[in-house]
Amino acid sequence: MLPLGLLLLLACCGAARGNLSRDESQPTTSDETVVAGGTVVLKCQVEDPDDSSLQWSNPAQQTLYFGEKRALRDNRIQLEKSTPNELTISISDVVLADEGEYTCSLFTMPVRTAKALVTVLGVPQKPQMFGHEQPIDEEKLARLTCRSSGSKPAAQLRWRKGNRELKDTGTEVLEDPNGKTFTVSSRVEFRVTKEDNEAEVTCTVDHESLQNAERSTTQKLQVHYKPTAKIEPHPQYPREGEKLQLQCDGQGNPIPQEFLWEKEGSDAPLQLSSDSVLIFPFLNKSDSGTYVCTATSSMGSVVAKYNLDVSDLPQLPTPHVHSTPGPSQPISHASMATASSFTPAPIQDASPVPSTSSTYHAVIGGVVAVIVFLLLSLLIVLGHYLIRHKGMCIRHGETVTSRHRPKPAEVMCTYLTHEAKGSDDAPDADTAIINAEGGQAGGDDKKEYFI
């Protein structure tokens, strides 16, 4: 018979062995987090299966796998490993409805179980931005809204303009109709300037399901601001008599579409059209003065001035810029003084007609000079001809000039040239004829008979 002390020792050892056996037969699992659309792996392990089988069931207590046997017909659920000590399965294309507690069971007496919580993350949609569709006037407030749906848990939104972070003015979180995901909205306000035109504003959504990948949307701002203008001459240093084009360079958003050209001191405008160029093909000194271009857009008007002093030699321009307040908005003036000018024309013509008095004078002078030259040439030729062909008529020894020719009689006219011998030294016409007839054997060739 065993002593009482030994019996107590054996009882304690048996109890300890029984507790160790129960711990080795307890299955173990782990919680899993998966992004919607991904794949989750569920692993159940046991050290001492005690010749029992492992089983996986879903949150609805439907058996998925009993050992290596499929129990639920769902092709997304696949067996990864089945041994007496482990049962591992995978679920692909996870959806939000797959979220919940999955149970691993070991069918001993009693049945031992372990729970695995599967969390499905809802991926937020690409954010959408509102409030940028229409242009914003300069110095007005821009109010933009960014919205993203489908996140679980609720996502966070942040703003950026260019490289600078913007602080939002409020965030709103609403539960989606499916009861599982959320829609997040964020608003931002800031005052715009002309420098914000074409500036990029970005809204970014941050969520753990994105795994450090950025999902954002970017939009460009359209800011309307007042126009500016300056006058550029082409060429820069024109001279008198040359062609000149003045370009009224209007900038702004929207770009000026109407240009009014005037000359200070003149009542009538020179040109009013959508063409910003004033063309003058001929320059003269009478065109000196100050010319004004008024560029107009929907945001207002601006005036640019250009001072011209036409001279024979080109001079360097003296640019200067000044501002003159208008009745409803500030107006900036840009003017320059140069050594050349141009001729304005009536408003109906886009290209003003230059002063043409000098042109007409030059043409008329040329025509008169040609006529005078022709007349002088004709007189010289005629005088030369008359000098070389002097002559007289003789009837019965009488000298008859051409103005006193007798009508009915027969007259013999003898023509003598300076080459006739003795003609230059003869005291009178008769002696010249006698000398000519006596000194020339062929004198008969120079006689004509008139009836």
Image (tube, rainbow, N blue to C red):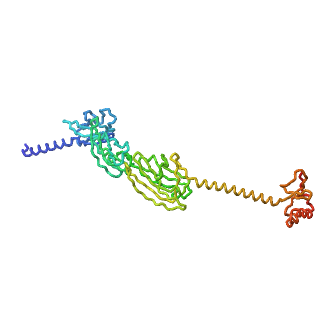
Snapshot quadrant of residue 243: bottom right
Nearer to us in this view, 207 or 126: 126
Nearer to us in this view, 259 or 49: 259
Query: Quick one: quadrant of the N terminus?
Result: top left
Snapshot quadrant of residue 78: top left
Nearer to us in this view, 1 or 18: 18
- Give the residue displayed 46% in from the left and 48% down from the top: 260
Nearer to us in this view, 346 or 217: 346
Snapshot quadrant of residue 31: top left
Q: Is residue 168 left or right of residue 337?
A: left
| Residue 323, horizontal then vertical, whole percent | 39, 55
- Give the residue displayed 51% in from the left and 62% down from the top: 315
**Count of labels in the image:** 0
Q: Is residue 410 left or right of residue 282?
A: right
| Residue 38, horizontal then vertical, whole percent | 33, 41
| Residue 448, horizontal then vertical, whole percent | 89, 55
| Residue 171, horizontal then vertical, whole percent | 27, 43
Q: Is residue 238 left or right of residue 371?
A: left
- Whether residue 352 is visible here, answered yes or no, is yes
Can you name the residue that lies furthest to the left here?
4
- Give the residue displayed 31% in from the left and 51% down from the top: 165
- In the displayed structure, 62 sits above or below 218; it is above
- In the displayed structure, 16 sits above or below 263; it is above
- Whether residue 220 is visible here, answered yes or no, is no
